[in-house]
């Protein structure tokens, strides 16, 4: 029986496994707004993950990237907090049925793979040099989470039924999710996703960004590569044909990063992103107040469960 696993909890580097996860109430709806759906829809879709290798530590530039909509959505670490609370409730329920339950690692203090790291395509030289447009391997903390999910997929049938119900839609997991969802206001996921997608697309039409795209394209052409925008380069179908990046892919990605820096494209695009999102928030204050209320309520519920059960014994940082 497939194990329900929450969608949107992991970066675009894990599309195949993420597809099998069923979201807890509200959490996955909000996390996509933090950028995952954006990365999978409007920004360049990720190429296949490169086989395990030493992860590249996120750069200061990547860590600094933020957008105003972050104030209304769940970060990846917020999602991990909610998952951890759900796990604690699930474990209590499972123990009541005579089984144990392995917890996911507790939420870390720092995200090893910042959510907006690839928002504007590849921006880090080392990532470009080693992986091109392929997704780097997950960091150790992400691998640890995946290992727990894999072990859950191999649970004996009796434990699976206790955890997920006979049809995969109930059991202790559903009991835990229902408990966490109590008192959390409903939000319109599609509406919020619409704001995210629309503002990202609008940022690309800002005259300063259009001009920066032109300068970037000219820089790339001078290096022997013809692409109109960085999204076109990242979305080149040729990159998906191999498990590891070919020399040309590496060359294009390296030139991409060089040209982004030479033209100041990321700073220009980020500024436009900020302005467009702030305008959307100002024009739809009531909607965004509801989004913030739902996010805050879900985090309070999760933190209350963790506080009542006891703080995590260690950090994953």
Image (tube, rainbow, N blue to C red):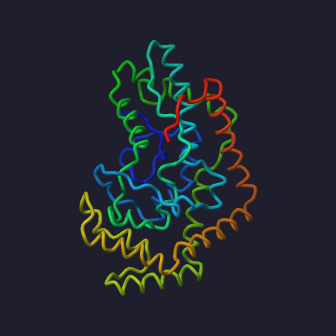
Left or right, 227 with respect to 197, comes to: left
Task: Write down the quadrant of residue 89 in the picture.
Answer: top right
Q: Residue visible at 55% across and 63% down?
A: 197
Task: Return the residue nearer the eye: 314 or 28.
Answer: 314
Task: Write down the quadrant of residue 144 in the picture.
Answer: top left
Left or right, 185 with respect to 215, comes to: right
Indicate the position of residue 97 as horizontal and vertical percent values.
Answer: 48, 13
Indicate the position of residue 20 as horizontal and vertical percent values.
Answer: 40, 41
Task: Return the residue nearer the eye: 197 or 256.
Answer: 256
Left or right, 275 with respect to 241, comes to: right
Q: Residue visible at 48% across and 65% down?
A: 42
Indicate the position of residue 239 as horizontal and vertical percent values.
Answer: 29, 66
Left or right, 117 with respect to 64, comes to: left
Indicate the position of residue 289 as horizontal and vertical percent values.
Answer: 73, 52
Figure check: 185 above or below 214 = above
Q: Residue visible at 75% across and 58% down?
A: 285
Figure check: 232 above or below 76 = below
Number of numbered discs present?
0
Figure check: 273 above or below 304 = below
Location of the N terminus (image quadrant):
top left
Task: Return the residue nearer the eye: 159 or 188.
Answer: 159
Q: Residue visible at 69% across and 39% down?
A: 297
Figure check: 49 above or below 152 = below
């Amino acid at each position: 029986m497939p194990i329900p696993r929450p969608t949107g909890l992991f970066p675009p580097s894990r599309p195949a496994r993420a597809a099998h996860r069923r979201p807890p109430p509200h959490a996955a709806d909000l996390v996509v707004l933090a950028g995952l759906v954006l990365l999978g829809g409007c920004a360049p879709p990720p190429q296949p993950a490169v086989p395990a290798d030493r992860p590249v530590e996120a750069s200061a530039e990547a860590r600094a990237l933020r957008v105003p909509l972050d104030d209304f959505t769940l970060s990846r670490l917020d999602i991990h907090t909610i998952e951890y609370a759900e796990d604690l409730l699930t474990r209590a329920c499972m123990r009541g049925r005579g089984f144990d339950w392995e917890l996911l690692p507790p939420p870390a203090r720092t995200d090893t793979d910042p959510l907006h790291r690839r928002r504007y395509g590849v921006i880090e030289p080392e990532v470009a040099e080693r992986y091109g447009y392929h997704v780097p391997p997950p960091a150790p903390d992400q691998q640890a989470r995946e290992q727990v999910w894999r072990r859950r997929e191999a649970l004996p049938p009796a434990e699976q039924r206790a955890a997920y119900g006979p049809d995969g839609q109930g059991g202790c997991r559903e009991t835990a999710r229902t408990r966490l969802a109590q008192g959390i206001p409903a939000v319109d996921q599609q509406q919020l996703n619409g704001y995210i997608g629309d503002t990202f697309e609008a940022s690309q039409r800002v005259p300063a960004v259009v001009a920066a795209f032109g300068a970037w394209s000219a820089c790339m052409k001078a290096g022997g590569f013809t692409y109109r925008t960085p999204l076109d380069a990242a979305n080149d179908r040729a990159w998906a044909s191999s498990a590891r990046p070919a020399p040309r892919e590496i060359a294009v990605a390296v030139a991409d990063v060089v040209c982004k820096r030479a033209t100041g494209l990321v700073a220009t695009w980020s500024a436009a992103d900020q302005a467009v999102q702030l305008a959307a928030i100002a024009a739809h204050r009531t909607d965004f107040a509801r989004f913030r209320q739902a996010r805050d309520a879900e985090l309070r519920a999760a933190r209350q469960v963790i506080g009542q059960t006891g703080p995590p014994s260690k950090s994953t940082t």
